[in-house]
Image (spheres, rainbow, N blue to C red):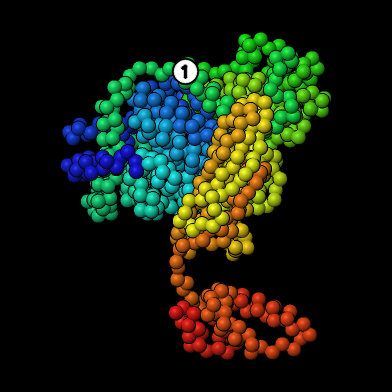
Amino acid sequence: MSNLKNYYEKAKGLVAQMTLEEKSQFVSGRNMWETRGCERLGIEKLDMSDGPHGIRKQLDYEDIAVDASVKTVGFPSGSCVSNSWDTDVLNKMGKALGKNAKIHNVSLLLGPGTNIKRSPLCGRNFEYFSEDPCLAGELSLAYIDGVQSEGVSACVKHFAANNQETRRFTVNSVIDERALREIYLYAFEKCVKTAGVDTIMAAYNSLNGNSCSQNKRLLTDILRGEWGFDGMVVSDWGAVTNDVAAVAAGCNLKMPGFKNNPAGIAKAVTDGSLLQSELDESAARVVSLLLYAADTKSKTADWGRGEEDLDANHALARKLAAESMPLLKNSGVLPLKKTEKILLVGEYAEKPHFQGGGSSNVNVYKIDSAVELFKENGWDVTYISDFSNKDAILSAAKNVKKVIVFAGKPVSEESEGFDKPNMNLPQPQNAAIQALTEAKIPTITVVFEGSAVEMPWADDVSAILYAFLPGEAANGAVYDILTGEVNPSGKLAETLPKRLEDTPAYLFFPGEGDVSFYGESLFTGYRYYDKKRIKTAFPFGHGLSYTNFEYAKIKTDKPEYPDTDIVTVSVDVTNTGAIAGKEIVELYVAPDFTTSAKGVIRPVKELKAFKKVGLSPGETKTVTLSLNCRDFAFYDAVISDWRVNSGNYELQIGASSTDIRGSAVVAIKSTRVEKIVYTRDSLMSDVYANPKGRVIIESMLKTYKFEAKDKESDEQAYLKMILSMPLKALILVGVQAEQVDAIIKQISD
């Protein structure tokens, strides 16, 4: 339940007192960042702001330039903080953003970005959490809870299947129903049912032929009808092309409001092309948000007052980033020793690539410099910013113990509004790194990037710290990890493939014209690499520590469960190293393809639960994880519902998607009772699975005379052929249609 539910009835009463023109105005914004109010009825307007990782409150609502927004702390982007796999980290960040929103009189914060990372080329991947819906969903819940605990409403976006920037206003995402439900809607459903998010943003793109902001099936049938959403739906900025169709579909607030056409909506009600009830519903949803915001403000003494503690939030941003960055490789060169002379290479060592461009771009407080941090803390460092001066780099490298290369795509290639052309780092960066490794100089690479890039030198460097886009304190967090002030504990929230051609959507992304066909269906990320047995650069869920962890005693509380029960899995995790560290325990469900997944297309395994646990040296903790019915289910498009098949499921405990440390097998019994409807188009194999049908088919087979030498082989081949046919095929061999219908009636009774 959202915070808005308790205000809905009062909102309906106020809407009933409005004129048709007033109602028509309420379903569109006042300007770029405000809703409308109604002084006559005592309804206050509301201010909203981007964004997912920092407040972008414009000083002038007519000016959208980044430097015209308030100065604030830029926290780690979704691409970075997701690698923490830590709901506490996301909750802390959400609370900090909520507090900042209150200071700046912002009642609605536009975040989090919950869309699935379908392709590494998506220009907006830096805002999103993961390729996996379970991880994206759980992290979104924690973020939303943090924001909304401060009395500020969160807005989960972009609903739905906004997975590319190419032609984002006009592209039609064509997705089969199973993939839509299991991959692209799953996290949003969690945000509604579990987090009680107050608002949802409808995406720019179309979904299966209908614009998301004008898609009644998406916004009304699924969101409100199936999931019970009781909050407000806002459009993405400029997404609505037909005001009347948007209101009718369930998009309650069109943003921005510069081109509002209330007369058009009022005329549509008058001429009957828009129902009065549809307009009233949308206006009431908007008013319920305004009432909640006004009530919250009145109960919060410091609302709109005070100043952000920039230094405290900068320190928090640094801590959260350090909790999130995954250390992908370490051949013993990290952590650094202060006695070692080091060389820093690349301009990002001074001014890192820490956030993406577009609506979430924050006017940040200050930017950490790794060069300055090393010098200030007494390290003997040399710094070369220019990658193109390879000779100077190699010459300087001969006089140091280790080289740290700060790499990443140009800032200009990481933005909302366009997709990336490739997964390549700039050629001078790759050339310099390769030259250092060929010279046998220990090289540590730090990568600033919102998604995956190709790393042709991955096997040759001594260490890789994948920083993603970690916010303004990026280099502070990098310094903390490299020097051992922080023991790294991040793990990849997305797979890093070896090359673009290996990626699941390679053949289909970004599509042809205005159509993007999701031909990979369910097989996003590690689901695809598992199924195709493709070796990646670094797998989903991978990340190293400066200590080691062992897993033991993996067990469930019983071997068999009805699908109505909660399945409890436990595992003992021990820190076998010399320093304290944190480990992320990952639980994957793998269906048995001879029982529970027989005849159903399913991934090899899917992440269904996880937990991050801190351990002192030598300490053991028992980690307990729980699974429910949906964790074993797939979406059956035929019955338009989730289905659990009876059979065996292997519960795999892993340190990554490819590093499975042990497993337990459970038998799940489906409690769903379904009557199978047989028709002339039903396959003989389905009939054969019915005890009555089996008797009929075996009786028919006895009429066939086998004269071949290998009679048994002939019978088996004939049975396979028969079972592949529909019942109506019997008519072709002389069985009367009435007899076929009689068989159907007999097996259906």
Residue at 17% x, 42% y: name it.
Answer: 17
Kindly indicate the quadrant of the structure image that contains residue 446: top right
Residue at 73% x, 34% y: name it.
Answer: 458
Task: Out of 687 and 673, give the one closest to the viewer.
Answer: 673
**Looking at the picture, how far across and down is residue 475, in whole percent?**
60, 21
Q: Residues within 10 Å of mark 1 (few under 14, many from 20)?
A: few
Residue at 43% x, 17% y: name it.
Answer: 309
Give the structural element (helix, strand or loop) at label 1: helix
The relative height of residue 726 versus residue 258 in the rendered view (above or below) is below
Q: Is residue 73 left or right of residue 245?
A: right
**Looking at the picture, how far across and down is residue 141, in whole percent?**
45, 39
The relative height of residue 451 versus residue 248 in the rendered view (above or below) is above
**Looking at the picture, how far across and down is residue 620, in whole percent?**
60, 34
Q: Quarter holding the N terminus?
A: top left
Q: Is residue 543 left or right of residue 199?
A: right
Q: Is residue 480 left or right of residue 263?
A: right
**Looking at the picture, how far across and down is residue 438, in whole percent?**
82, 28
Residue at 47% x, 18% y: name it.
Answer: 312
**Residue denoted by label 1:** 312
The kind of residue tagged 1 is Ala
Kindly indicate the quadrant of the structure image that contains residue 97: top left
The relative height of residue 683 versus residue 500 in the rendered view (above or below) is below
